[in-house]
Amino acid sequence: MRMRNKPWAMDFLQENNSIVDIDSTYSGRVGAFFPDTGPLHVEVGTGMGTFITELAKKYPDINFVGIELDKNVMIRVVEKVLESGLLNVRLVLLDANAIDAYFRNDKVSRIYLNFSDPWPKSRHEKRRLTSRSFLEKYSTILDEEGLLQFKTDNRGLFEFSLISLNSYGMDFHEVKLDLHADEPEDNIRTEYEEKFSAKGNKIYRIRASF
């Protein structure tokens, strides 16, 4: 997701450093970022923040970390956390390539990949968040019973992800070809999900473990 550049973005994020980590202050010690202990769930790519904030409201005993690379997008997510008064959401301005280093001393119970950039060109395959190089990173930070949850409306990315996860030897717990046809109660729709579903696009979901 790309938004118009806001020159004041970094100043705003710095002013709210109790919620967002912009310089990897909590790298290797994410637990210290939260007032209470709890299982750790991570969303890679926050969008506008609806998913992570709604999930945090539903599960107050779980600590949620949202990773986002775009500082302009992060502004809106911070605003949503502030508006909701949630204490179990923290945000990190971070390239997903560094996820294993950031969480190196922490064990994550779940990783969410929601409507990630499909990077459709073959030469960009390694940039897809379900490519082998990213799966290697996730495998080092997920705990023994940890789950990877992936949602997309992009058929090509869905098929690529099925093959990639299977080739890596992951165990599939769920593969849904039309999530909204019989929508589970636990599904929280993202902004993209609402948009794509309204256009008639099918939503795919995978849950798998290492």
Image (tube, helix red, strand yellow):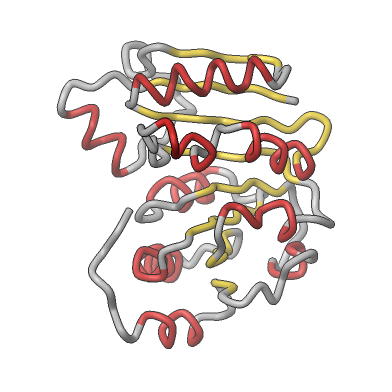
Query: Does residue 5 sit above or below 141 in this rendering?
Result: below
Q: Residue at x 61, y 48 (%)?
A: 42
x then y, percent, for residue 113: 51, 38
Query: Does residue 151 sit above or below 71 in this rendering?
Result: above
Q: How many marks?
A: 0
Q: Residue at x 61, y 77 (%)?
A: 23
Q: Residue at x 56, y 80 (%)?
A: 17
x then y, percent, for residue 175: 52, 13
x then y, percent, for residue 84: 42, 63
Residue extending farthest front: 123
Query: Does residue 25 sit above or below 170 in this rendering?
Result: below
Report the quarter where the C terminus lies.
top right
Q: Residue at x 17, y 29 (%)?
A: 198
Occupied quadrant, residue 37: bottom right
- Side (left or right) of 207 relative to 105: left
Query: Does residue 147 sit above or below 133 in this rendering?
Result: above
x then y, percent, for residue 181: 32, 12
Residue nearest the viewer, comparing 186 with 200 = 200
